[in-house]
Amino acid sequence: METVGNQTEVTVETAKELGLLPEEFEQIKTILGRTPNFTELSIYSVMWSEHCSYKNSIKWLKTLPKEGPHMLAEAGEENAGLVDIGDGLACAFKIESHNHPSALEPYQGAATGVGGINRDIFTMGARPVAQLNSLRFGDISLDRTKWLVKGVVKGIGDYGNSFGIPVVGGEVFFDECYNTNPLVNAMSAGIMKADKMISATSYGVGNPVYIVGSATGKDGIHGAAFASKDITEDSMDDLPAVQVGDPFQEKLLLEASLELAETDAIIGMQDMGAAGITCSTSEMSGKEGFGMTIDLDKVPTRQAGMLPFEILLSESQERMLVVVKKGREAEVKAIFDKWDLNCEQIGEVTEGGRLEYYMGGEKVADVPAESLILGGGAPIYEREYREPAYYKEYQKFNIDSIEEPKDLKSVAKYLWNHPNIASKKWVMEQYDSMVGTVNMSTNKPTDAGIINLKGLQKALAFTVDCNARYVHADPEKGCSIAVAEAARNIVCSGGEPSAITNCLNFGNPYNPEVYWQFVGAINGMRKACEKFKTPVTGGNVSFYNQSMQNEKDVPVFPTPTIGMMGIVPDKTKVKTLAFQNEGDRIYLLGEAKNDISSSEYLYAYHKMKESPAPHFDLDEEFALQSILKGLIAEDLVVSAHDCADGGLFITLLEAAMPNNLGFEVNTDSDFRKDAYLFGEAQSRVVVSVSAKQEEQFVEAMAASDVAFTLLGEVKGDSMLVDDENYGKVSDAKAEFESALENYLTK
Amino acid sequence: MKFGVITFPGSNCDQDMIYVLEKIMGFEVVNLWHKDDDLQGAEFIILPGGFSYGDYLRSGAIANYSPIMKKVVEHANNGGYVLGICNGFQILCESKLLPGTLLHNNHQKFVCKNTYIKADNNASAINQGLDTSEALKIPIAHAEGRYFATEEMLKEMNENNQVIFRYCNENGEVNAASNPNGSLENIAGVCNKNKNVFGMMPHPERAADMELGNTDGLKIFEAMMNAIQAVV
């Protein structure tokens, strides 16, 4: 095989340049029984990269609960998890990161992230119905941050808007730990007939293998390997590793794929994401133990003279690999012809489990499929971990060390103008949130995004959540909180949590302190998911989100973003977060605490960065959500809003703004007033209750173990706390809605 | 009345439109394909929103050359009804069935939000059943929606009552603050001289389902159908 593209002599040095470890190089030699050629080594380097192999995380990921009564495809089995939602339908959903590309080229990086995650959904035969995203950027006053925000938001918007799937939720968070490494996590969810799933598999000797969609170019080569290392000053040299997106092609590919799903002409289909043809051919083949011969000359390319490894590793977007049932080729070709898409046979299924790639009539690589993939020959590592010193230090925080400000009104104003708390309208309005005519939250704001299932009694609920500051302070508790908050958002909206997907953004796994954060987060996620009976359907791991700053390696906050799906059994009972009527009583469900730990108030206003995660107890949380579900089912509350970032005061303000209804509330002198208003102790929800249902409501609450407090009532157009006027709701709203734009454009 | 909703490659509001006409309003609808050269007996043609052919060149520019558009132009010239929404409006301007053009929004960003519009007059089928003092809540979603025409054209259009909708605030006041994209004279929709071809940037089909909590768009469709069927 001393042929095209394989002239380079391969040594351990070549392997190291491609990101492989010396022992991995030895392992490859053992598998092949010889030294790999350059093409083969390239194949191993991408398939064994962190991004594709999960080699440093899989041991812990396997401890997460993945089974549930409604799971049709569990984590790792298919491109995305699949949940039975009843009525013969299933929901496929997944979240994925595109952090590294977005750090270098925010527009294309974010756009192709959206493209990739949607392909994961429709490659299974599901039509995407909702998108969400979770974005994290550095200090908002930096020009680089502003450039990144604008590019990422435009990239997500231009791609998703054209592709035509509504964005129904998301989060945007700023902290200097993300100065170099922004996080761009995109989630998509789709609906399909439960018995129509297209599997990412290949079998049947002689069945033809097709590549469909866009032509293959030189973009994104070694993208997966690029995502598997730290960002340094040399990273700009990796720019070709960033792919370029074409949402129009994706839209055509979507429609063609869904027409294909209606036939039974295919064996399997897989999206080409990371590691392109290499990954799709090996993962599809490895599953059932078959092989493939692939003729790289047949692959439609964008430019002449591409080398074998370039074609194999290209991450050109909007492509799929399809294994067709022999004899049904014409049917498949007709569908792609209709949509003016490439559809070329490039090979066929073989016996024996070997992937043989040919070019110019010669074999350029020959590797066993199974040796490349997760669950097969790809390496699995146990990494050492060590509790960092800061963890114990943070626990020592005492609220008494913070003097309570005299003027809490200015604290409130500071918070509603803070970029982490202020409205994300400037971002969200750049996304089409209404295409598809299923977004039930447009005219009725809710904590989770609600998706109408036309013609059915039920609806779906989606949310993405993670307060990374809590996770940093205490990975286990913080990650449990992320799951709990997602569930709380769904319950507040009238839904029932079903399952989660996760996007695990961390620093370098070879750093034991980073790995300690990872292990802690997984443990916290496991506990919470077991409690809420929300299996983990899949997701992705993004390590190496760290960079050198002032000659120190600085990882981002550990950020395990949780994407949760829930079912609203009765869509007439979707619950808004907004106050509806003057005179309605306002109650706090859950306990007030003398706790300001890790709050935006403590961190940003007092600039105290060293405190533990806020109060959280899983059983308390579960009890709160259970009682709230009952209250909503029995129509005993008018509105329900999760008490989160910014604390009780911000929760009240957010409930007040949509209908411009004010409130009069009283605090409790058993607690410091700043903690009462701005603390972020968990497991609390603000509800409004009509006067005529108050008695029934109080009875229901009194029969439970969940604490509840009458705060006051919905009244007038101002915000009154202990008879002190915090201003007009409309004035606060004007600032709340323009703050982010002012930061970004001035 | 039989409707024809065209799907161009990149259309993404075609199914939303069909859902409203068929499931909510109970009309017969045929989904037409851009490569077709037959309107299949449809009497009212709708060009839906989306990004036809990716809209990489200029919104609507390529769709104008699709085989189906030849038939749409014929249909319109014979007095048949045609409505373009969002990208459909852009295509109708490209094909010169409607006067003027749609430029990049003055803020240079895509914007999706609820806006208010009101009927400017009661001179054509699409607005004749509407109250000209009532603000209707209809969402927009576009990057190129800033309506532009020459002064001369505008004068003529105003004289002929060819401006069908203008952006306003929730109290029905037409002013700069209620203009979401910099359109001349707050124009949200126009029609041709013969008043059988309509175009509008806001999406009434996104405000037509009770389950989504806003049916102001349905009001427009219903008023329009009443007007048309009264004539027939």
Image (tube, coloured by chain):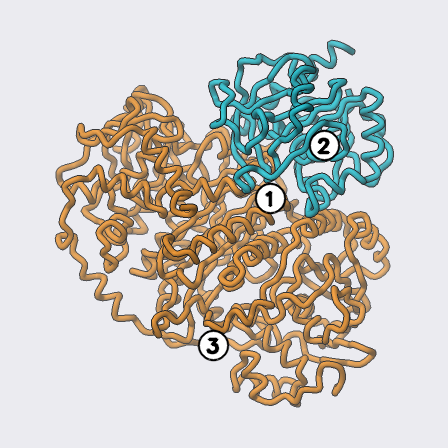
Q: Residue A706 lies in what quarter of the image?
A: top left
Tag of residue A381 = 3
Camera-near label (2 vs 1) is 2
- Which chain is home to disc 2? B
Q: Colour of chain A?
A: orange
- Element marked by disc 1: helix
**Label 2, on which residue?**
B93
Q: What's the residue type where badge 3 is placed?
A: Tyr
Q: Colour of chain B?
A: cyan
- The picture places residue A745, in percent across and down from the top left corner, at 43, 46
Question: Does A536 appear above or below A54?
Answer: above
Camera-near label (2 vs 3) is 2
Question: Does B5 appear above or below A76?
Answer: above
Cα distance between the residues tagged 2 and 1: 21 Å
Q: Residue A671 lies in what quarter of the image?
A: top left
Work out whether residue A653 can be spotted.
yes
